[in-house]
Amino acid sequence: MTPLLIIHGGAGKALKDPARGPIVRSALRATCEQVYARLNEGLSAMEAVRLGCELLEDDVNFNAGTGSVLQSDGQIRMTAAIMDGGRQAFSGVVNVEQVQHPIAMAHVLNSEPDRVIAGAGASLLARELGLDIYDPRTNKRLREWVDERDRGFTSDPAQVVASDHRTGTIGVVAMDTQGRIAAGTSTGGRGFERVGRVSDSGTPAGNYATQNVGISCTGIGEDILDEGLAVRVAVRVEDGMTLVQAMEKSMQDSVKRGRMLGAIAISRDGKVVWGKTTDLLLAAWDSGHGVHDCVDAVPGPITQQVGG
């Protein structure tokens, strides 16, 4: 089968700095190109998702891994999840500290009996796996935290998702040459949040896959949780809707309730779809016809099929 790949780097209000668009587009397209080449060589969907997420976690343009935003106490706590659609197996780490690739830990847990580990337990797991202690902070993120602290942590969460200096959660959905689907999502969180907050990215609301469809979400985590977005799209597909119909209905419902979110998805019948209720969705994809992106998509709610 022709492999399919779509990745995202956040959703929110439009970027105020026009120079940010080309930087983010270049980063997304480079990752998409590298991962899709490996899919063409026979890499499994799960390994492709892990690879894509690791590349984006290493890119300081995104709020995941290196370059994650700081929480209200000035610490970085990261969350990641991965789901094997064929086995319908979900795994993740929540609020893990001092690791380079949270998605790698989520990947290891996918074959373990305890598949979601949080907080101190996640950090202990990192040490048990022999992962090096790693500081994901950047000077830019530290300056942002100092500025926000001086404002009393009052920023609009939507601005935190995609401002001049930030882009949001990253995600990867892939289908390999065997038709297997997987989805992965990784984030540094909303930024400046209460210590202990759990984002949607470590739950099936933000990341879900079956043998027929995979979805990764981004945007305001609480909005995604309230909608149960990834599972909602997946259930609608399993119940007979096309992926476009399922995404469109889910976005329409979200608009009615004033949610700010976005999602990327792939279905086993070869469809690649994205949807958003926000001004901005930073995504790129390849469905066998080269890399494309929607960084310049029109503001406002939209659902679009871009492959298949």
Image (tube, rainbow, N blue to C red):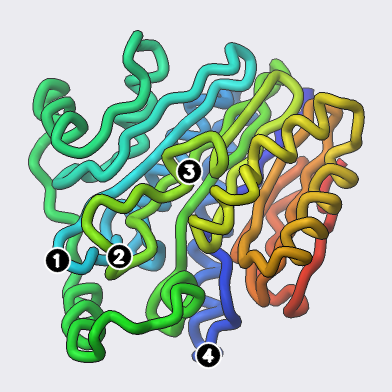
- Would you call the spot at circle 2 few (<14 residues within 10 Å), some (14-19), or many (20 or more)? some
Q: Is residue 23 visible?
A: no
Residue sitting at x 59%, y 44%: 216
The image's mark for residue 73 is 1
Q: CA distance from mark 4 to mark 3?
A: 25 Å
- Figure disc tally: 4
Image coordinates for residue 275, horizontal then vertical, percent? 74, 57
Q: CA distance from mark 2 to mark 4?
A: 23 Å
The image's mark for residue 185 is 3
Residue sitting at x 58%, y 79%: 13
**Mark with earlier residue (4, 3):** 4
Contact check, label 2 and label 4, Cβ < 8 Å: no
Q: Amino acid at mark 4?
A: Lys
In the rendered image, the quadrant that contains the C terminus is top right
Residue sitting at x 34%, y 44%: 79
Secondary element at tag 3: strand
Q: CA distance from mark 2 to mark 3?
A: 19 Å
- Would you call the spot at circle 1 few (<14 residues within 10 Å), some (14-19), or many (20 or more)? few
Contact check, label 1 and label 3, Cβ < 8 Å: no
**Mark with earlier residue (1, 2):** 1
Secondary element at tag 4: loop
Residue at the disc numbered 2:
193
In screen coordinates, is 249 left or right of 93? right
Residue nearest the observer in this picture, 306 or 16: 16
- Would you call the spot at circle 4 few (<14 residues within 10 Å), some (14-19), or many (20 or more)? few
Residue at the disc numbered 4:
16
Q: CA distance from mark 1 to mark 2?
A: 9 Å
Q: CA distance from mark 1 to mark 3?
A: 24 Å
**Mark with earlier residue (2, 3):** 3
